[in-house]
Amino acid sequence: MTRNGYITFLKALNSDYPRYGTLFDVIYQHRCKHLVEIGVYNGRHARQMIRAASAIWHYSEITYNGFDLFESMTEADYRSEFSKIPKTTAEVGALLVNTAAEVHLHMGDTRDSLPLALPKIPIIDFVFIDGGHAKDTIAHDWGQVEKAMQPHTVVVFDDYYDNPMDGYGCQELIDGLDRTRYSVEMSEADATPQVWGTLYIRMAIVRRK
């Protein structure tokens, strides 16, 4: 399989939600191998992102740092963040161990874990922000990532809602970014059924100018 064919294959695995192909395109086009994900959930996209990087790099050259509440998530966390209940660190670790990439999982609230861990990661090529969906949580996570960004770092935000939900999503943050400092590209929108109707979700790709 060609490299482009491999990325097409990964996109096909996410055909129900095509915006996830953005992750693989960015990793491949920007030759990313040092990956950070905020909001690991079940580890499936982590494994796919590592595989996207492996289309260019050997697995031994790839690093992955994943941040989530994992088994420490409470019912209050679940309700306040409009989020999903993640797998445990052991379950995600077991899924990722066969990739042979260097994997580090960080459990806890990102208000605590990101300030401690991000400054210790020597190279960050790519960040996927898809953790808590509350605006305050996204703003905090971006504040920590922004400080850790290097000139080549690409940051992808999930949960840009075309029909905004009060208190949730990254659209306010993305719309407010200084376009003289950052370039912003938007993915196609996925239609996601909710009990009240259809939510249209995009990803935003952010880079320093």
Image: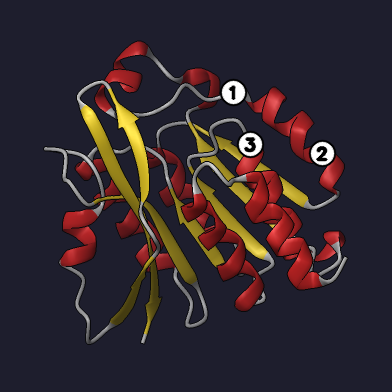
User: Residue at label 3?
Assistant: 43
**Lower sequence index among marks 2 and 3:** 3
As drawn, is 74 to the left or to the right of 123? left
Q: State the image coordinates of residue 118 (x, y, percent, origin top left).
A: 50, 56
Q: Residue 107 appears in which quarter of the rendering? A: top right
Q: State the image coordinates of residue 76 (x, y, percent, origin top left).
A: 29, 15
User: Residue at label 2?
Assistant: 97
As drawn, is 33 to the left or to the right of 19? right
* Residue in the image at 65% along x and 38% along y: 44
| Outermost residue toward the left in this view | 166
Q: State the image coordinates of residue 207 (x, y, percent, origin top left).
A: 40, 76
Question: Are the two marked residues, 1 and 3, in contact with CB atoms closer than 8 angstroms?
Answer: yes
- Secondary structure at badge 1 equals loop
Count residues near mark 1 (Cα–Cα under 10 Å), then give few for <14, some for 14-19, many for 20+.
some
How far, Cα to Cα, is label 2 from label 1?
15 Å
User: Residue at label 1?
Assistant: 87
How far, Cα to Cα, is label 1 from label 3?
8 Å
* Residue in the image at 67% along x and 76% along y: 31
